[in-house]
Image: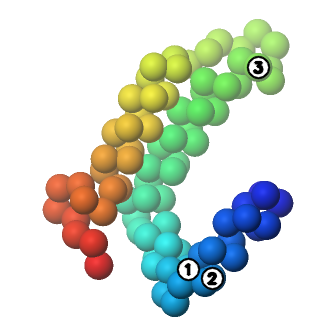
């Protein structure tokens, strides 16, 4: 987070309206749903490293597929969506 604050955040503030547009996009229901879906998958997949005896749910390929699917669903150029 410190690296983001140092390197990326100032760039979001340079262009007029960019920060507001990014925040609006990240608050969209589709984006929030994708974030929850990815977090749930990641929790099941990575829990094995933190909890002795836990069973891994999912795979690296499954994660990559879900990530690609989520990106397609929320991308501004995805079906039914337009750049604003």
Q: Residue 49's mark? A: 3
In the rendered image, the vertical position of residue 7 relative to residue 63, given as above or below: below
> At 61% across and 84% down in the image, what residue appears?
14
Image quarter (top left, top right, bottom left or bottom right) of the N terminus: bottom right
Q: Secondary structure at mark 1?
A: helix
**Whole-Å distance between the Cαs marked 1 and 3?**
36 Å
Which of the marked residues, 1 or 3, is nearer the chain's N terminus? 1
Picture coordinates of residue 41 (x, y %)? 53, 33
**Whole-Å distance between the Cαs marked 3 and 2?**
38 Å
Contact, CB < 8 Å: mark 1 with mark 2? yes
Closer to the observer: label 1 or label 3?
1
In the displayed orientation, state which residue is furthest to the bottom: 16
Residue identifier under label 2: 13
Residue identifier under label 1: 19
Regarding residue 15, the answer to whether it shows in the image is yes
Closer to the observer: label 1 or label 2?
2
Which of the marked residues, 1 or 2, is nearer the chain's N terminus? 2
């Amino acid at each position: 987070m410190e690296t983001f604050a140092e390197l990326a955040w100032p760039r979001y503030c340079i262009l007029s309206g960019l920060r507001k547009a990014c925040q609006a996009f990240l608050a969209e229901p589709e984006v929030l749903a994708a974030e929850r879906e990815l977090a749930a998958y990641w929790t099941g997949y990575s829990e094995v490293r933190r909890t002795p005896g836990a069973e891994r749910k999912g795979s690296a390929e499954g994660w990559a597929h879900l990530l690609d699917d989520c990106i397609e669903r929320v991308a501004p150029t995805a079906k039914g969506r337009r750049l604003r």
